[in-house]
Image (cartoon, rainbow, N blue to C red):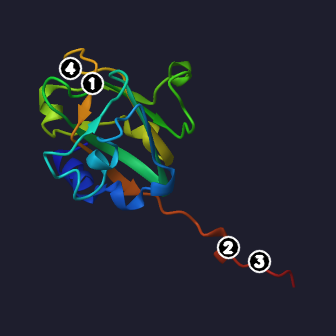
Amino acid sequence: MSGESASALQRSQVDLLDFVDWSGVECLNQSGSHSLPNALKQGYREDEGLNLESDADEQLLINIPFLQVIKLHSIVIKGPEEEGPKTVKLFANREHMGFSNVNDFPPSDTAVLSEDNLKGKPVIVKYVKFQNVRSLTIFIEDNQSGSDITKVQKIVLCGTTVETTDMKGLKKIEDH
């Protein structure tokens, strides 16, 4: 792929926040006072003072359903240098996962976040594994320092929507 077409691909990516089905979003092991909307919702995630924090231990399990099928290109996960996420596993279309079964399924992709990633450098996902995504599960397995609390300042999902055929709009062709 030439540099020109790669940058054109980048330009067509959008923040997928508008396509999140908020009624089904859940985060397991989040602190009651530092919950997922702090890192995911517009306005909140731009506030450096707000973040998502883990509760009982360092792990977080986030499920994000979408209102329509999307293609995920990259993900930004910002966090502090010490308590920021380290190992992040992404699962496409694996709903209703819990800590008891998260290791039973192979992840669609795994990333070990660098200091640059924690400052906002996007992680480019294995694009072929994220072509027809109805939901995304993000498993934050550990953090940079190995401490009990993981902090996430911002999560941004970048990609495109998939044009789908409206089956209700199709008309039956009559035989003559």
User: What separation in Å lies between label 1 and label 2 (alpha carbons)?
Assistant: 48 Å
Q: Which amino acid, mark 2?
A: Lys
Q: Which mark is residue 144?
A: 4
Q: What element carries label 4?
A: loop
Residue bearing mark 3: 172
Nearer to us of marks 1 and 2 is 1
User: What separation in Å lies between label 3 and label 2 (alpha carbons)?
Assistant: 10 Å
User: What separation in Å lies between label 1 and label 3 (alpha carbons)?
Assistant: 57 Å
User: What separation in Å lies between label 2 and label 4 (alpha carbons)?
Assistant: 49 Å
Is residue 167 in view from this perspective? yes
Instruction: Name the N-terminal-most of marks 1 and 3.
Output: 1
Q: Which mark is residue 149?
A: 1
- Residue 18 placed where, x, y %? 36, 62
Q: Mark 3–mark 2 contact, CB under 8 Å?
A: no
Q: Which amino acid, mark 3?
A: Lys
Q: Residue 168 carries which label?
A: 2
Badge 1: few (under 14), some or many (20 or more) residues near its Cα, within 10 Å?
Answer: many
Q: Mark 2–mark 4 contact, CB under 8 Å?
A: no
Instruction: Name the N-terminal-most of marks 4 and 1.
Output: 4
Nearer to us of marks 4 and 1 is 1
Q: State which quadrant residue 119 falls in.
A: top left
User: What separation in Å lies between label 4 and label 1 (alpha carbons)?
Assistant: 10 Å
Nearer to us of marks 1 and 3 is 1
Q: In this view, does 122 lie above or below 84?
A: below
